Amino acid sequence: MEEAAMAGLIVDDREKNLFRVDRQVFTDKGLFEQERQKIFDRCWLYAGHESELAKPDDFVTRQVGGRPLLLTRDQKGGVNAFINACPHRGNMVVREKSGNSRNFTCFYHAWSFDTAGALIGVPGEDAYSESFHRKDHGLARVPRFESYRGLLFVCYDANCVDLVTYFGDEAREQIDHVIDSAAADVEVVQGAQNYSMRANWKLLVENSIDGYHGLPTHQRFFRKYLSDLGLQSNVTSLGSTDSRGRSLGNGHAVTEKPRHMTGLTAGAASELAAQRQLIEQKLGKERAHKAVDFDRNVFIFPNLILISTWRTLRTFYPVAPDYMEVDAWALMPCGESQGLRQKRLENFISFLGPAGFGTPDDVSGLEGCQRGFAGGREARWSDISRGMAREQPVATDELQMRAFWRRWHALMQDRTEPIACGDRD
């Protein structure tokens, strides 16, 4: 797409408090290919959690940014990220989703590798010349691989900034709050939610930090399901002023609101109170208050969302302009009683996932948007102006979405200058 046309995809008029997105960004095949190059090939992407590789020789395979990855913990305890493709002919070396193995053998020609990626076996190796050296044919490492508080990230751009710099102070603090809301370490529970939808991936970015849709879209959960259980909802009205949405800088964003009683606390009050005391001892009362007493959706550009209410990590990747694949995991505190862990898991699946109350609503909504985009030039613009004129935007406003779109627009125009954080435009 030409430079002028790319620049015109977003209308960001701060004098008139008007923000619009050309719906072409959700349908254009050329833009889709450019996104892969300018965003998914250059940004840090969530790949997994260290708890999934708890023991030496543990491994996990998954698709990240369109590439097949193999994550391992080697014999020395190091965590690695490889491209899951044999250096010989390119076949996927490991086909299982996860497991524990001291070595991996490619199904095609039986080349074998250890968990540190070294080539350790070649059938008929005497057929090769003296120029052939095993050390030159190990599994290819991802250009950049870093961990923050157990969260594993990869980047396919060897020249990118380090992970902590990529987050920035504001986003890093929000990640800390999610993790520090547990009294001990956190772990990804075995199993995952994997589903897809016929909608553009950027629609799920919007949806994941969109407080405006919560009550209208999810009435069955907030007004029916919870009330039938005799529980209080933490989504009470569209105009709630005790919540807020914020830009965390460089496309990252968060929505926050005070935490209310939910079904999670039923029958677990004493254990949760003991956990709260431990958290306060570790962090101090003020920081513990910030970590424990708020529900937050933390968005890390371009496609990671941490949802504290349901202790969820979620990523989503584009397969086509109108099709994405979604992965989600439960991120739970270690060392809790079996009863509390079960309550947390029930809370997790009651709303999220293919069989939850919330996810089918969202899938229906986003696929409906994608079908509506067939309106083309006669229905060209999506409006994301809500709250621009407000002195103090709330979570049902759209400041947090504008934060994403401003970063997206900058990167698509090859502009990498920092984008400010804050709770105002």
Image (tube, rainbow, N blue to C red):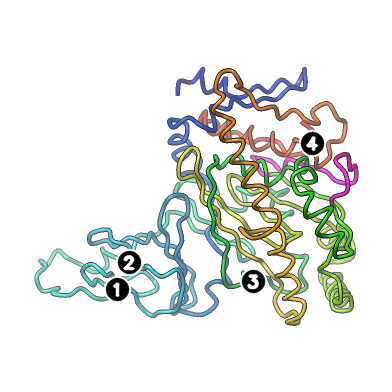
Do tag 1 and tag 4 residues touch (Cβ < 8 Å)? no
| Secondary-structure class at tag 4 | loop
- Identify the image quadrant of residue 63: bottom left
Mark 1 → mark 2, Cα distance in angstroms? 6 Å
- Bin the neighbour count of mark 2 within 10 Å (Cα to Cα): few under 14, some 14-19, many 20 and up: many
- Is 229 left, or right, of 52 in this rendering? right
- Is 27 left, or right, of 390 in this rendering? left
Do tag 1 and tag 2 residues touch (Cβ < 8 Å)? yes
Q: Residue at x 70, y 49 (%)?
A: 171
Query: Nearer the viewer's eye, disc 3 or disc 4?
Result: 4
Q: Residue at x 63, y 23 (%)?
A: 381
Residue marked by disc 1: 105
Kindly identify which numbered label has been placed on residue 397: 4
Q: Amino acid type of disc 2?
A: Val
Mark 3 → mark 2, Cα distance in angstroms? 27 Å
Query: Nearer the viewer's eye, disc 1 or disc 4?
Result: 4
Mark 1 → mark 3, Cα distance in angstroms? 29 Å
Of the pair 264 and 54, the residue shown nearer to us: 264
Q: Is residue 177 visible?
A: no
Q: Which residues are magenta?
A: 235-252
Q: Residue at x 46, y 45 (%)?
A: 319
Q: Is residue 25 visible?
A: yes
Q: Amino acid type of disc 4?
A: Asp
The spot of residue 23 in percent (x, y) is 58, 27
Of the pair 347 and 415, the residue shown nearer to us: 347
The spot of residue 92 in percent (x, y) is 32, 62
Q: Amino acid type of disc 1?
A: Thr
- Bin the neighbour count of mark 3 within 10 Å (Cα to Cα): few under 14, some 14-19, many 20 and up: many
- Bin the neighbour count of mark 1 within 10 Å (Cα to Cα): few under 14, some 14-19, many 20 and up: some
Do tag 2 and tag 4 residues touch (Cβ < 8 Å)? no
- Identify the image quadrant of residue 421: top right
Mark 3 → mark 4, Cα distance in angstroms? 32 Å
